[in-house]
Image (tube, rainbow, N blue to C red):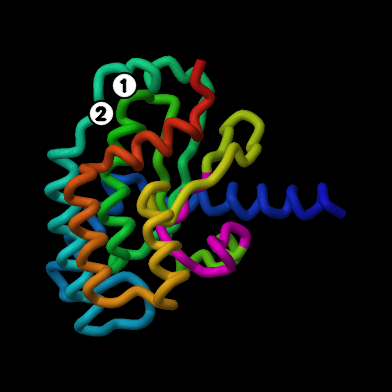
Amino acid sequence: MHTTIENNVKEIVEKAITSAMTYEEYRDLMRTLVAENKSTGVEQSDTLVNYTMLNDKRMKRLDKTVKIDTESAEKIKQVDTKITWLILTESWCGDAAQTMPAIQKVSAQNKNIIVKIVLRDENLELMNNFLYNNTLSIPRLIAVNNDTQEIMGDWGPRPSKLTKIVEAYKAEHGSLSAEFKEELQVWYNKDKGQNTIKDLMQLLPLK
């Protein structure tokens, strides 16, 4: 029974990868959505459209500014396993906008690491197999060995340090206030993608 479930998940992941976008295609989609005053997903609202616009600006900035230190880059370059990082996201997701440029920068260091992107609400069967704390939280990254189709691990929806901060806040206050969400953006701005990069390196078969 357990093996059947694992095989089923592998098939769902494999199917998603075949229909997934590249990072460049996703960025093109974001720009198109902004131009058309839209967001991804069936539900359309001024709020989601505004988040999409903000996220496109954030990603444009981070695509240019996220840096990987030389030592980390050298380690990433040595990975000789062919890996796909499949990301579930939506254009309105603030955490995704803050972390996906860092994910792409790591991938860019080594042609063996490929980033593929699918939209959560179009891939709920996949999402339901990779819930975070039983929620549909995104982004979610699924690391797949391309040769064996084995799931090597997953990551998200936030960098590990920020996850601890958020969990502590939720434990005390129940839900995230608007003020706290602004504090999250300040944290991301200071971190500059570095915690995400370190987390992702834990997912890699480094020597």
Residue 73 percent coordinates (x, y):
31, 21
- Of callouts 2 and 1, the N-terminal one: 2
Q: Which residue, given by chain and number where applicable, does mark 2 sit on?
A: 68
Q: In which quarter of the image is residue 94?
A: bottom left
Q: Residue at 25% of width from left, 18% of height from top?
A: 70
Residue 110 % position (x, y) = 37, 24
At label 1, the amino acid type is Ala
| Secondary structure at numbered mark 1 | helix
Task: Find the magenta span and give its range.
Answer: 129-142
At label 2, which amino acid type do we have?
Ile
**Residue 185 located left or right of residue 3:** left
User: As displayed, is residue 74 above or below residue 140?
Assistant: above
Residue at image point 27% right, 56% down: 97
Q: Residue at x 32, y 65 (%)?
A: 93
Is 11 above or below relative to 152?
below
Residue 80 spot, x, y in % from top left? 49, 18
Question: Crowding at label 1, few (<14), some or many (≥20) Cα neighbours within 10 Å?
Answer: some
Q: Return the mark for residue 21.
A: none
Name the residue carrying label 1.
Answer: 73
> Depth check: 130 or 85 in front?
130
Asked whether 149 or 71 is in front, the reply is 71
Compared across the picture, whether 85 is left or right of 67 comes to right
Residue 122 placement (x, y as % from top left): 47, 68
Picture quadrant where residue 170 is located: bottom left
* Residue at horizontal 51 percent and vertical 64 percent from the top: 123
- In depth, the one of 19 and 42 nearer the eye is 42
- Marks 2/1: CA distance? 6 Å
Which one is nearer the viewer's eye here, 52 or 207? Answer: 207
Number of disc labels: 2
The main secondary structure of the magenta stretch is loop
Quadrant where the image shows the N terminus: bottom right
- Report if the CB atoms under discs 2 and 1 are less than 8 Å apart: yes
